[in-house]
Image (cartoon, rainbow, N blue to C red):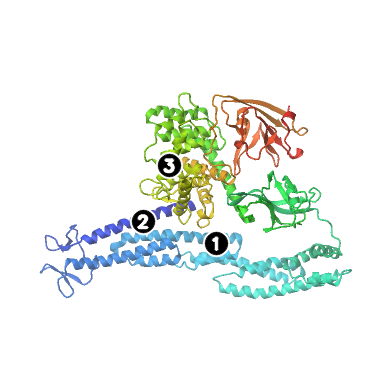
Amino acid sequence: MRKKFLSSLIAAVLSFTLFTSTVFAGTNKLWNNVKIGLDKTGQTVVNRVTGENIKLNDLEVKDIKYDGNKNKILNKDSKKITNKKICKVTENNLDKLYKEAYDATIKCLNEKTQKSIKEARKVIEKLPKELNWAKGTFSVQVDQVQQPIFTRIINYINVSKKTKQQKDINNGRELVKDVIETQYRSTWSSELDKVEGEKISKVVDGINKMSLVNDNTLDLKEVKEEIDDISTVKYNDGVKEWIDSYKVDLNHDIEGLKSLTDDYAKSVSEGLSKDEINKISSCKDLDVLVEYLKLIKADKDKAFNAGRLWAAKTFNVASWKVEKQQTLDVQVAIALPSGSIYTPTFVNDKVVIDNNKQSKGFTPLGVLEAIGAKYEVNKEGSYVTSISGIGAKESDGWMYTVNGKEIMESPDKCKLKSGDKVLWYYATKSNQWKAPSWEELLKTQNQNERIDKALKNNLKYLTSLSSKDLNEWNSLVLSKCGEKVSEENLNKFIKSIKDKKDKAQDTDYAKAIIALTAAGKDARVVDKELNLVEKLCKKGFIKNNVFSEAYSLIALDCGKYEIKNVTDSVRKDLVKNLITKSKDKKGWGFGNNVDLDTTAIVMTALAPYNDSVKVKECIENAAKTLANMQNKKGLYYSEWTGESSESLSQAIIALTSNNIDPASKQFTKNDNNLISNLLSFANDKGFMHNKGQAENILATSQATQALISYRDFVNNRGTFYELKDFSKEDNEKSINIQVKISIPSKKDPISKCENFKVNNQKQNITVLDSLKNVTDKYIIENSTYGLFVKSILEIENKNYDGWCFTVNDVQSSVGASKVNLKDGDKVLWYYATEGNQWKAPKWDEVK
């Protein structure tokens, strides 16, 4: 409902803008040309230009009369009035009233406050009947502003009913107090009164209980919190005075509790020193006191011993023996730097450290043991040198915080308490070794989860497309997601170019090359009759067509294609042309204007060349232009497409291709960055072109490209259009790769082995390609951290166990889609388990 309302509001504002410009034009035309006179009969006053009758009263020209005998228009003194004077008086009256109403309405649309609504309605009401058409239109616009305020009031009422928080009640009252014109005002106030009344009743009941029995102390903390919350009341002086009086009663009960606690401390003081007694009785912490009395209440028969044991733990009284704690619950996160932010690789709000299982006990090292993370420390054990295979380099390395504070103590010495938040992070010089906050990590994790969900929904949507809808761009997206595009569909792109013959454009060749390369095909030899790369280079680029040149450059670079004595010169010409066509080095576009879509695609095309001073200057200026083009909401607006998701997608691809963070402060407006704004266009099936619409293919395809590009950017996995490397390809040479799949059982981690042999007509095959070539029984998932293998031969990852690989008995620190193989390589896929400490078997061990 909210999306539908926002969509209609945007449409109304746009139509209003067009409407007002038309009205002013019509108004000027009417009054500037009017000439007053008599018609042919000499009996009627008319507009001599249009021939229309003019009623003097309708024109609001006062003290004017018509003298039929003398055939003149007279004033109240019976003196003749010229047409010019009539025209001037009339024009000023109507234009002034209209302008006042227009200005008030525009102010209302901009400020969106109840005060501006009141002012606008007052001015609109003054419009004469000749401007009834304007009165109706202006009133509609004001109503469009009023409705969201009503909606916010209802939302605050509903939220306050759920949270029972005074701040939510205050927010609702602040809006209600300004709304005096509506019949619902008393109803809304009544609903907020009910919530406030429930809170007040809770305090009264709690205070009454505390004045009856000693056991009431269990309610003290809760009552204090409720009183403190109600004390923040606004717009209700009666409640404010009432709650202040109850604070007196509360303080009296707190003093009584302190006295009771003090007496009890003395009653269990046998064998204690005077200092130890004082340590207990001088406690001022309300939470500690309440906890103390809870324990006494729960164990009355053994109050003496229970009290001593609790006091020993709480006040560190050495003379009392305390049992050793066996388990400890803590919150844990591990984070790696991703550009200007940190990305959590592990987050768990309840990790149990068991003293019997974790040798390092209740320490940050014990935390790593508890979550099963592999780590190494230096000889002295004073700091961690690596976690999960990621080691320290030069001045960069692993550090930790506890509850947001950087701890310089050795991680095996730092003692943790229940509920502590332990964060291990990889500190880098580029981030000034600054630790991320827990809240920042949760925000990033939430965004990553939204990205994962969106990519999953998008992939489901795009894989359901018919062959007719599977164009080059959608094929590219599927390949980037690890999906296999059929040979039939790939051949369709080649056939399309052949059918066009000489009419095929450069962009036709470029799109086909990009789609085929993403699918792992060398566009130079995929068809025996047609070398697409050579044809593109010889085709000749469309004069002054920036898009053609940009996409042609992307096509050549996506596979790092080389044709001797051809591609180098073509690349140089394209880069030179694109630099030359920059509009004052601020961006690119058609005509004299810079537009977002053109600027974004050229930035993407020039990304591999930004080590050039000229290119770098163009890219940096264009990035500033993209930031300046954002509106207050952080979106991009076009009179042709409105606020569209596709514009956001293209900007994200352009920025990430040039190692610029689209979620950075530069591209954040009112807490909304390009990524969060793009995700706001997602629904359960795909992405919308404009908010409030249904998902469509183009928006979904481009959003998928943008999210993959951002995901690869934060994980340092290259740019979106870095698809393959065919620069050293020997297309006539076959290569042989051996592949084994080791499948564990309960008794033997290498109980079964599948042997495969890959004979491929290309050298640029990855470890992931090798798996696809030898079996169809696999599942690949697209996550925030890239493609990963979820299942092979119907055996899925589980908990900390899962599929890993080695190449020639060497483990890799990057994903299977990034490791290229050469002739003779031996790829071993094995299922790593906690039982065998996640160790990889050797190639020769697997028979």
Q: Is 521 drawn above or below residue 689 in the view shown?
A: above
User: Residue 398, percent across and down?
Assistant: 68, 51
Under circle 3, the secondary element is helix
Q: Is residue 349 left or right of residue 29?
A: right
Q: Is residue 83 left or right of residue 515?
A: left
Q: Nearer the viewer, residue 725 or 475?
A: 725
- Mark 2 Cα shell of 10 Å, populated few (<14), some (14-19), many (≥20): few
Residue 588 seen: yes
Q: Decide: marks 2, 1 in contact (CB < 8 A)?
A: no
The numbered disc on residue 320 is: none
Q: What amino acid is at disc 2?
A: Thr
Q: In this figure, which residue is indicated by the disc labeled 1?
A: 157
Q: Decide: marks 3, 2 in contact (CB < 8 A)?
A: no
Classify the position of the C terminus by image quarter: top right
Residue 803 in which image quadrant:
top right
The numbered disc on residue 576 is: 3
The numbered disc on residue 17 is: 2
Q: Decide: marks 3, 1 in contact (CB < 8 A)?
A: no
| Disc 2/disc 1 C-alpha distance (Å) | 34 Å
Q: Nearer the viewer, mark 3 or mark 2?
A: 3
User: Residue 193, percent across and down?
Assistant: 56, 67
Q: What amino acid is at disc 1?
A: Ile
> Which of pointers 3 and 2 lies earlier in the amino acid sequence?
2
Q: Nearer the viewer, residue 687 or 297?
A: 687
User: Residue 396, percent across and down?
Assistant: 66, 50
User: Residue 292, percent across and down?
Assistant: 78, 65
Under circle 1, the secondary element is helix
